Amino acid sequence: MTRLIPNKMLLAGLVWAMLCLSSPLLATHPYHVSFAEVEWNPKTGNFEVALCVWPADLEKSISEMQGRPIDLDAEPNLESAYQAYVSRRFRIVGESGKTSPMRWVGSQVGLKQAWLYFEVTGDKKPGRWTIENRVFYELNDDQLNQIQVKVGPARKLVSSTIESKPIPFETDEGSRKR
C-alpha cells in the first residue's frame, strides 16, 4: 500500500533511516529499508536518482543475480552488476507505459551503506510518471523502500512495500503546488 507521509514525518523518517544505516551495533539488520532521492531536472528532462541501500543486501542480490558468491570488497568492476540489478528493480515509466532508459553514474559502497547513482531519461515537457522501487523485494518480505520525489520546490516522500503499486507523480506546475 502506498501512502503519502506528511512533511512532519519526513524528518523523523530520514533520521530513522540514517540511524539504521549508521548503527555500529548491527552485524545483521532486523529491518530492511532503502531510501531513494529522485529529482527531476527540467533543463535535461531527466530524473537524477541517488539510492541508498544496505551493502549486505546488495551483495546477496548481486550474488543471486550472478549465480555465484560475490564479495563487494574483493570483486573488481561491480558497476555493471549494480546497474544490471538496479535496472531490473527500479523503474520510472512515462504516460506511454514505456520504461525510461537508465544511465549509470556510479556508486559509493562502504561498510554500512551503499549509494547508487543513476539518471533515468525523462522529458523536458511536463507529464505524468510512475515510479517503482522493488529493490530487495526478492530477499525480504518486510522490505520498506522510501522514495523522496522532488519536482521544482515540491517534495513528496512515499513509502512502498512488497504489496505496493507504482507511485504516480507529475512534472508540471500543478504538482509543484501540491
Image (cartoon, rainbow, N blue to C red):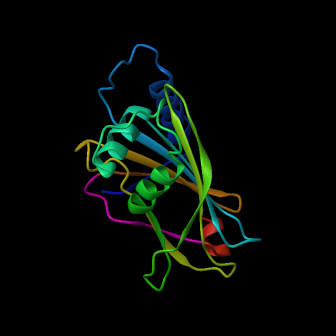
How many badges with numbers are in the image? 0
Q: Where 129 sits versus 66, above or below?
A: below
> Left or right of 163: which side holds 105?
right
Name the residue at the right extreme: 43
Q: Position of residue 143 (x, y in %)?
A: 31, 43
Name the residue at the top extreme: 25
> Left or right of 114: which side holds 140?
left
Name the residue at the bottom extreme: 96
- In the rendered image, residue 163 lying in the magenta stretch gets the answer yes
**Residue at screen point 32% across, 31% down:** 31
**Residue at screen point 26% across, 50% down:** 138
Q: Where 169 sits versus 96, above or below?
A: above
Which picture quadrant has residue 45?
bottom right
| Range covered by the magenta-colored residues | 162-170
Q: Quadrant of the N terminus?
A: bottom left
Tell which of 3 and 83 is nearer to you.
83
Which picture quadrant has residue 124?
bottom right
**Residue at screen point 60% across, 72% down:** 121
> Left or right of 92: which side holds 137?
left
Q: Position of residue 142 (x, y in %)?
A: 26, 41
Q: Quadrant of the C terminus?
A: bottom right
Tell which of 81 and 169 is nearer to you.
81
Q: Position of residue 2 (x, y in %)?
A: 36, 57
Q: Position of residue 58 (x, y in %)?
A: 40, 40
Tell which of 72 and 17 is nearer to you.
72
Tell which of 117 and 131 is nearer to you.
117
- In the rendered image, residue 93 lying in the magenta stretch gets the answer no
> Left or right of 151: which side holds 79?
left
